Amino acid sequence: MTSVSSALPQHIAIVMDGNGRWAQRRMLPRLAGHKKGVDALRRCVGLCGQRGVRVLTVFAFSSENWARPADEVDGLMGLMASALAKEVTSLKANGVRLHCVGDRSRLSEKVRASLAQAEQDTAGNERLILNVCFNYGGRWDIAQAAERLRQQGQPIDADSLSAALALAHVPDPDLLIRTGGELRISNFLLWQLAYTELYFSDVLWPDFDAQDLDAALHDYAQRQRRFGKTGEQVAR
């Protein structure tokens, strides 16, 4: 089957699902699974850099996750701040530029400061852009973009809305990977995923490794991306 794009996706988005279930199967607290999830993200960032992926966008904490038990939410907030502090040196060394995407208004001052510092420290890197979506939701993203345009007195159309979205600094994802066996996108990048290829894996996120990533990349390479055209048109 002919593909109209490079066999390698330049922008991969990932719903990192399964941390809690990974921990529960081992009789561990859910936060232990989230900590292992950070290890999996570190591994995936390195793998994407090695394979030539230019942009990696991950769903770390959704706007709906506030409904989880308070101790889990508090643990996730603390984990986010500590992980950023620990990972910045490695990100800088590996040419990774960090963008933290989402509504920061509900985050603590400590977490906001950690986000800002990590972004500042990696601002000069160009090998891989890492977008961490934290307190993010696709509906929030579209609503905030429309409100920004309204306040600026600009017309709201497809082009202006795209330019006002939180991921306007990168092209739309070529490939979405969701781990953990769930078959939905869960309010993630609703606008940006319009023509993204979707790949669902039963592997829980803490176990997602090089073999699993390469399986997703191989699957993507077999697909024909038509963007509304016929297969015959794009095969020419």
Image (cartoon, rainbow, N blue to C red):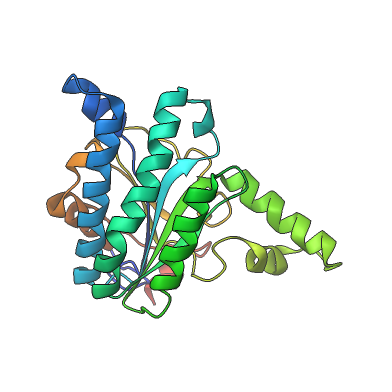
Is 137 situated above or below 195? Answer: above
Picture quarter with the C terminus: bottom left
Q: Residue 231: x, y in percent?
A: 42, 64
In the image, taking residue 209 as reference, residue 17 lies left or right, namely right
Residue 1: image quadrant is bottom left
Residue 88: image quadrant is bottom left
Q: Residue 211: x, y in percent?
A: 12, 52
Is 133 situated above or below 91? Answer: above
Residue 128: image quadrant is bottom left
Q: Residue furthest front?
A: 110
In the image, taking residue 206 as reference, residue 107 lies left or right, namely right
Is 186 situated above or below 143? Answer: above
Q: Residue 147: x, y in percent?
A: 77, 55
Q: Residue visible at 36% across and 72% down? A: 5
Can you see residue 236? Answer: yes
Q: Residue visible at 39% across and 41% down? A: 78
Is 223 situated above or below 23? Answer: below
Q: Residue furthest top?
A: 27
Q: Residue visible at 27% across and 52% down? A: 41
- In-front residue for pair 59/79: 79
Q: Residue furthest left?
A: 211
Can you see residue 222? Answer: no
Q: Residue visible at 39% across and 37% down? A: 76
- In-front residue for pair 222/111: 111
Q: Residue 106: x, y in percent?
A: 60, 42
